[in-house]
Amino acid sequence: MQFRVFADDSWWNYSPNQIINKYHLPSRYLLVSNTLAPTKNHFVVLEALKILKERNQSMLVVFTGDIHDYRNPGYYNKFLSCIHEFGLHDYVRILGMIPKGDQFQLLRGSVGLLQPSFFEGWHTGVEEARMLGKTIILSDIQVHQEQDPPNSLFFDPHIAETLAEQILTVFEADLGEHNLEKETIARQSYLHLQLGYARRFLQLADL
């Protein structure tokens, strides 16, 4: 179902900097918010960061979400081993499961959202990033193309070189400051989508 998202009213009362400081993050980082599982394709992110490291490009990707996939219990350790093998300790921060309000503030303060999955449904995180006017790097799977948010960049989820270029583009375009004006414009635009979704929901419910 093509749904829209609604943020908790209290989340708008905070500055993203409060949460950025809470997790000791720099002003510029890219956010990935997914369970660590094979279908989410986290390893292509590490491969892209390895390429950027070899080019002497410094940047940080922050991972939030459950680090334990019961179907693949060894996946997290493989992920850590790959970080060590590629020497990416300064390029990656794994926060794991954090409060939803914190994750939302980290998205607000980020340079953008990265969604590299092989398979997905209509994605809540993509909708939240759209509501905030964030740049979104998306794997070019069908559902992401259907979701098609503004300010999106698509890449083949098997090609790390393309992803590396897009990550670099996003970082170079962002000054590391929370753009409240841009966010406000995006929220106003997204309100029309929320209202349309609410009307369709009521029609389906025959209310």
Image (cartoon, grey):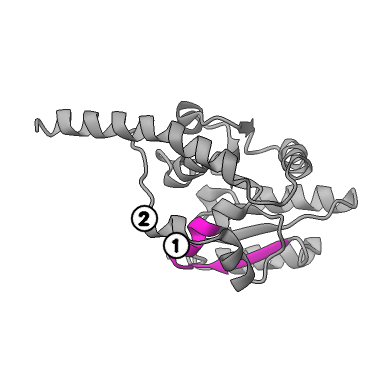
x then y, percent, for residue 26: 72, 63
- The disc at residue 8 is 2
Residue 100, magenta (yes or no): yes
Q: Which residue is mark 1?
A: 101
Q: Residue at x 63, y 51 (%)?
A: 178
Visible in this render: residue 175? Answer: yes
Q: Looking at the image, tell me whether mark 2 or mark 1 is earlier in sequence order.
A: 2
x then y, percent, for residue 109: 61, 54
Q: Amino acid at mark 1?
A: Gly
Q: Residue at x 52, y 58 (%)?
A: 105
Q: Tell me the quarter of the image containing the C terminus.
A: top left
Q: Residue at x 62, y 31 (%)?
A: 154
Q: Amino acid at mark 2?
A: Asp
x then y, percent, for residue 137: 62, 39
10 Å neighbourhood of mark 2: few (<14), some, or many (≥20)? few
Q: Which residues are magenta?
A: 92-105
> Considering only vertical position in the picture, is 58 above or below 66?
above
The answer to whether the residue labelled 2 contacts the one labelled 1, judged by CB atoms less than 8 Å apart, is yes
Describe the element under mark 1 as helix, strand or loop: helix
> Toward the viewer: 192 or 124?
192
x then y, percent, for residue 185: 52, 35
Q: Is residue 158 left or right of residue 15?
A: right
> Toward the viewer: 86 or 196?
196
